[in-house]
Image: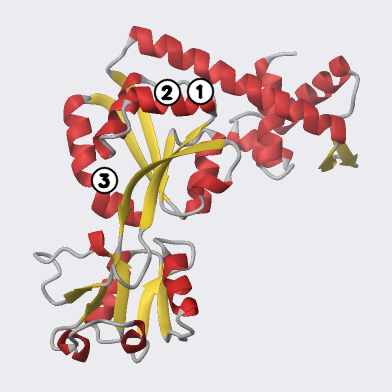
Amino acid sequence: MNLQQLRFLNEIVRQGLKISDAASALYTSQPGVSKQIKLLEEELGIEIFVRNGKRIAAITEPGKAVLEIAQRMLHDAGNLKQVAQEFHSQDSGHLTIATTHTQARYALPPVVKKFMKRYPKVKLGLHQGNPTQIAEQVLSGEADMGIATESLSLYDGLITLPCYEWNHCVITPPNHPLLEEKKLTLAKIAQYSIITYDFAFSGRGKINAAFEKAHIEPNIALTAIDADVIKTYVELGLGIGILAKMAFIPERDKHLRMIDAAHLFNPSTTKIALRKNEYLRGYTYDFMELFAPHLTRKIVEEAMHIA
């Protein structure tokens, strides 16, 4: 048994039981992958996969147990490399962050600027996606951390740390009737076509919940996955927008107007997600503290230990 065989096993499962896709992802040959899995099965004395001819149809029950142990061993092997890198080169390496468009575009730029100035030798990567994709990237090791508002706490393999709360706002074209209202209400918002986030993004659940609680049916005319698209269509006069307040920048969004809606929708919390039992490089702790100053190394390490 060796780590290469365990990597092959893990990748086959990750690729939906397709050996050809696993071989391609690992830059090796399909026969080579099949041979190593057969050798692993022979050594363990069990069948890991149910086969239909040359194709894999399913993973067996003992195979599931083997996979779980294999993933832990691969995780620990990765941690060993991280430990070695930390002591050999404390100020260089890689840091990959999976996050949403809103965070990457509006919350992270000043943090990234400070981090890159402090660690010029660290190669930083930003992967944008929806919350589910973000969680899966962190779980698989494709990303070192995830930053998002929704869904991250739903995964058993992750620990989540609250960073900050934010609220929604309503945006309109100049001279819109809503701007004349003394107090913004859900009923008044519902009189107009609404452009807002897709359900998986940026507190959309909080928006829906507010209207449902008030027994008001909003006229959602268009949804998008990022604030820039929402603002574009509001500028075109296709409706009013509901978006994260951080995404409205007066000096840039001169053709729009903003109305605070914090009193209408419950605040949302942006969180950082990390894999449980992960060994973190020193600069990873620094990045988190730059993003959320209350997340000191001590607090993060305590959270990792409890998990």
Question: Which amino acid does the dot numbered 3 rest on?
Answer: Leu
Q: Decide: marks 3, 1 in contact (CB < 8 A)?
A: no
Determine crowd level at label 1: few under 14, some 14-19, many 20+ residues with C-alpha closer than 10 A. few
Tell me how far mark 2 sits from mark 1, CA to CA: 6 Å
Residue 72 position within the rendered picture, expressed as x and y whole percent measured from the top left: 64, 23
Q: Is residue 83 above or below residue 281?
A: above
Q: Earlier in the sequence, mark 3 or mark 1?
A: 3
- Say left or right for 290 vs 117: right
Q: Residue at x 61, y 39 (%)?
A: 156
Determine crowd level at label 3: few under 14, some 14-19, many 20+ residues with C-alpha closer than 10 A. some
The quarter of the image holding the N terminus is: top right
Residue 301 position within the rendered picture, expressed as x and y whole percent measured from the top left: 42, 23
Q: Residue at x 48, y 77 (%)?
A: 213
Q: Earlier in the sequence, mark 2 or mark 3?
A: 3
Residue underneath mark 1: 305
Residue 33 in view, yes or no: no
Question: Which amino acid does the dot numbered 2 rest on?
Answer: Glu
* Helix, strand or loop status at disc 3: loop
Tell me how far mark 2 sits from mark 3, CA to CA: 22 Å
- Tell which tag, 2 or 3, sits nearer the viewer: 2
Relative depth, front residue between 178 and 254: 178
- Say left or right for 29 vs 296: right
Q: Residue at x 35, y 38 (%)?
A: 125
Relative depth, front residue between 252 and 94: 252
The quarter of the image holding the C terminus is: top right
Relative depth, front residue between 305 and 99: 305
- Say left or right for 188 vs 5: left
Residue underneath mark 3: 108
Residue 222 position within the rendered picture, expressed as x and y whole percent measured from the top left: 41, 79
